[in-house]
Amino acid sequence: MLAESRASKQTAIRTEEAAQEYVQQYAREISAGKTEYSVTGGQRLESFSDKKSYVLYTLSPSGYAVYDAASGVVEEMMLDCENPYTDSRKGELYYGGPMNYIRKVDGKYFMIMDGTRLSKSDVEKISEIETAALEQREAVKGVPTTTQYCYMSSSNYFTALLGNKFGTNTNGTCVQVASAIMLSFYDRYVNGQFVPAAYEDIDSTGCGTTEDFHLLLQSFMGTGPCTFSGAASGLNSYLASIYFSEPTVRVKDGKHNIVFDKVSENVSRNKPTVIGMSKDYNPSCTMNHAVVAYGYRTEMNGGAMVSAAYFVHTGWKSQKLGTFAWDWFSDALYIG
């Protein structure tokens, strides 16, 4: 496991100039110092909670960040893709948590990534998830003094995993895609029987799995949105079908800190974790995304953790180098 500590000069709430400097340094650090980033923009994104104020920054040479000005937390940062809000059509822009990029037009809400219209219930669920994240954040509020990074020792598997190596992440299949990524890791590093040879995708660009494997998992897990408990049941059935009695796919859910503890434990054991937004708020909603965590970042004040973020592969195209704030996630799916 790679672990580093760096001193920081941070305050809980920053001026605009200080916020841009913080985001710039954050980007440089998660790129392992390989790239110098500049920050432009500062576009406001509306919130579904009146207690938040989000700011969208564009990173150069590539990437973007969504920053919570009220608490000084980077909600998400991606270094290997462009700003998802580039569409210049009319309407108000909203942020509803990781990968929830929303436009409001004529009183209606639409997902920017695929044009899906959100129902009133969807909007209410986003607000509930946002409120839960805010409550968690305020419970650990403080001024960070040091920053720590921890990665799986084989985290380079995920940072190199391209978008054609795990199947198409169509609406409602993010848990299946994330599970395929997790199983492909186990197939590569633990036991070559996790993925049958016919479904492996191994070439000069690296290892992975095929679209057919994504479809195979759907035959066990369902073809649409599923809960993490349902996903675990389906994955265990899949493993049994290829004669695995052990290990077992397990689930932790309900609290952000429980999920964080499981992710940090798994990172120390070189094991990926599929994480998802809370199943307490309607797991079949389109906004409850699942991604693969392969590391984490913490901001500390003495021995107390002030904030944290997961290093994730999103399972969406080739978005694989970035972070999501920890307090949006309260489900974990893992093998062991």
Image (cartoon, rainbow, N blue to C red):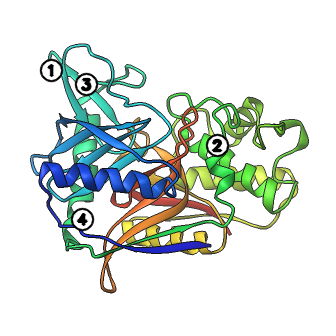
Q: Which residue is mark 4?
A: 137
- Identity of the amino acid at label 1? Gly
- Identity of the amino acid at label 2? Met
Relative placement, left or right, of 3 versus 51 is right
Up-down: is 229 above or below 97?
below
Q: Which residue is mark 1?
A: 107
The residues tagged by marks 1 and 3 sit, at their Cα atoms, a distance apart of: 10 Å
Q: Which residue is mark 3?
A: 103
Farthest bottom residue in view: 303
Residue at point 54%, 74% (across, down)? 3
Q: Which residue is mark 2?
A: 221
Percent across and percent down for residue 165 are 71, 36
The residues tagged by marks 3 and 2 sit, at their Cα atoms, a distance apart of: 31 Å
State which tag comes first along the sequence, 1 or 2: 1
- Circle 1 residues within 10 Å: few <14, some 14–19, many ≥20: few
SS class, disc 4: helix
Percent across and percent down for residue 103 are 25, 24
